Amino acid sequence: MSEIVVTRAQGLTLKKARASAEHIAAELAEEFDIDYEWDGNTLEFSRTGVSGSIVVTKKEVEIRARLGFLLMALRSRIESEIHRFLDDEFGPAS
Protein backbone atom coordinates (compact mmCIF):
# COMPACT_ATOMS: atom_id res chain seq x y z
CA MET A 1 0.00 0.00 0.00
CA SER A 2 1.31 3.44 -0.94
CA GLU A 3 0.02 6.70 0.49
CA ILE A 4 -0.06 10.17 -1.06
CA VAL A 5 -0.53 13.13 1.29
CA VAL A 6 -0.89 16.65 -0.06
CA THR A 7 -1.66 19.62 2.21
CA ARG A 8 -2.41 23.05 0.83
CA ALA A 9 -3.16 26.35 2.56
CA GLN A 10 -6.50 27.77 1.53
CA GLY A 11 -8.07 31.18 1.98
CA LEU A 12 -11.71 30.44 1.21
CA THR A 13 -14.53 30.38 3.72
CA LEU A 14 -15.16 26.92 5.12
CA LYS A 15 -18.41 26.71 3.14
CA LYS A 16 -16.66 27.59 -0.15
CA ALA A 17 -13.77 25.25 0.63
CA ARG A 18 -16.23 22.39 1.21
CA ALA A 19 -17.93 23.22 -2.09
CA SER A 20 -14.54 23.09 -3.85
CA ALA A 21 -13.74 19.73 -2.23
CA GLU A 22 -17.16 18.49 -3.34
CA HIS A 23 -16.35 19.60 -6.90
CA ILE A 24 -13.04 17.70 -6.81
CA ALA A 25 -14.85 14.58 -5.54
CA ALA A 26 -17.54 14.88 -8.22
CA GLU A 27 -14.87 15.05 -10.94
CA LEU A 28 -13.09 12.03 -9.44
CA ALA A 29 -16.38 10.14 -9.24
CA GLU A 30 -17.14 10.84 -12.88
CA GLU A 31 -13.64 10.15 -14.18
CA PHE A 32 -12.65 7.20 -11.98
CA ASP A 33 -15.95 5.80 -10.65
CA ILE A 34 -15.15 6.77 -7.06
CA ASP A 35 -17.80 6.76 -4.32
CA TYR A 36 -17.67 9.51 -1.70
CA GLU A 37 -19.52 10.91 1.30
CA TRP A 38 -19.06 13.63 3.91
CA ASP A 39 -18.39 12.99 7.60
CA GLY A 40 -18.26 16.46 9.16
CA ASN A 41 -15.59 18.40 7.26
CA THR A 42 -13.98 15.22 5.96
CA LEU A 43 -14.93 13.83 2.59
CA GLU A 44 -14.16 10.09 2.44
CA PHE A 45 -13.73 8.47 -0.98
CA SER A 46 -13.07 4.95 -2.19
CA ARG A 47 -13.15 2.47 -5.02
CA THR A 48 -11.35 -0.76 -5.69
CA GLY A 49 -7.63 -0.08 -5.33
CA VAL A 50 -7.83 3.38 -3.77
CA SER A 51 -9.31 5.05 -0.71
CA GLY A 52 -8.73 8.29 1.08
CA SER A 53 -10.04 11.56 2.34
CA ILE A 54 -10.19 15.28 1.74
CA VAL A 55 -10.10 17.18 5.04
CA VAL A 56 -11.18 20.80 4.89
CA THR A 57 -10.40 23.33 7.63
CA LYS A 58 -10.57 27.11 7.76
CA LYS A 59 -6.88 27.35 6.86
CA GLU A 60 -6.00 24.30 4.77
CA VAL A 61 -7.13 21.34 2.74
CA GLU A 62 -5.46 17.95 2.99
CA ILE A 63 -5.87 15.09 0.56
CA ARG A 64 -4.81 11.59 1.56
CA ALA A 65 -4.98 8.78 -0.96
CA ARG A 66 -4.04 5.17 -0.17
CA LEU A 67 -3.19 3.27 -3.34
CA GLY A 68 -3.47 -0.47 -3.67
CA PHE A 69 -0.78 -2.55 -5.32
CA LEU A 70 -2.13 -2.22 -8.87
CA LEU A 71 -2.25 1.59 -8.72
CA MET A 72 1.20 2.10 -7.21
CA ALA A 73 2.71 2.32 -10.69
CA LEU A 74 0.47 5.33 -11.36
CA ARG A 75 1.41 7.15 -8.14
CA SER A 76 3.19 10.10 -9.81
CA ARG A 77 0.34 10.64 -12.29
CA ILE A 78 -2.26 10.47 -9.50
CA GLU A 79 -0.25 12.89 -7.35
CA SER A 80 0.06 15.30 -10.30
CA GLU A 81 -3.72 15.15 -10.79
CA ILE A 82 -4.26 15.92 -7.10
CA HIS A 83 -2.06 19.01 -7.41
CA ARG A 84 -3.91 20.06 -10.57
CA PHE A 85 -7.30 19.70 -8.85
CA LEU A 86 -6.04 21.74 -5.89
CA ASP A 87 -4.59 24.43 -8.19
CA ASP A 88 -7.91 24.66 -10.06
CA GLU A 89 -10.06 24.86 -6.92
CA PHE A 90 -7.83 26.62 -4.39
CA GLY A 91 -5.18 28.41 -6.47
CA PRO A 92 -1.53 27.54 -6.95
CA ALA A 93 0.58 26.53 -3.96
CA SER A 94 2.45 29.42 -2.41
Image (cartoon, helix red, strand yellow):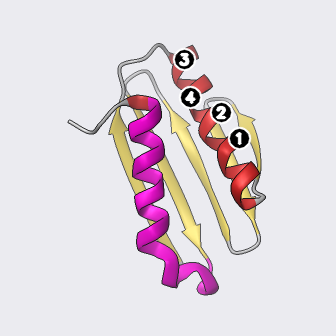
Q: Are marks 2 and 3 in contact (CB under 8 Å)?
A: no
Residue 20 is marked as 4
Dot placed on the residue nearer the N-terminal end, 1 or 3: 3
Give how far across and how far down residue 88 sits, in percent: 44, 36
* SS at mark 4 in the image: helix
Rounded to the nearest angstrom, the CA distance separating label 1 from label 3 is: 15 Å
Q: How crowded is mark 2: few (under 14 residues within 10 Å), some or many (20 or more)?
A: some
Q: Is residue 61 above or below residue 83?
A: above
**Quadrant assignment, res 90:** top left
Q: Mark 2 points at which residue?
A: 22
Instruction: Tell me residue 58's x, y (percent).
Output: 43, 21
Cβ atoms at labels 2 and 1 below 8 Å apart: yes
Residue beneath disc 1: 26
Amino acid of disc 2: Glu
Q: Distance between the residues labelled 4 and 2?
A: 5 Å
Q: Classify mark 2: helix, strand or loop.
A: helix
Mark 1 or mark 3: which is in front? 1
Q: Where is residue 78 in the image (x, y as percent from the top left)?
A: 49, 65
Amino acid on which disc 1 is placed: Ala
Q: Which amino acid does label 3 sit on?
A: Lys
Q: Magenta residues?
A: 68-89
Which quadrant of the figure contains the C terminus? top left
Residue at the image position 61 percent from the left and 24 percent from the top: 19
C-alpha gap between disc 4 and disc 1: 10 Å
Which residue matches tag 3?
A: 16
Q: Do the residues labelled 4 and 2 touch (CB within 8 Å)?
A: yes
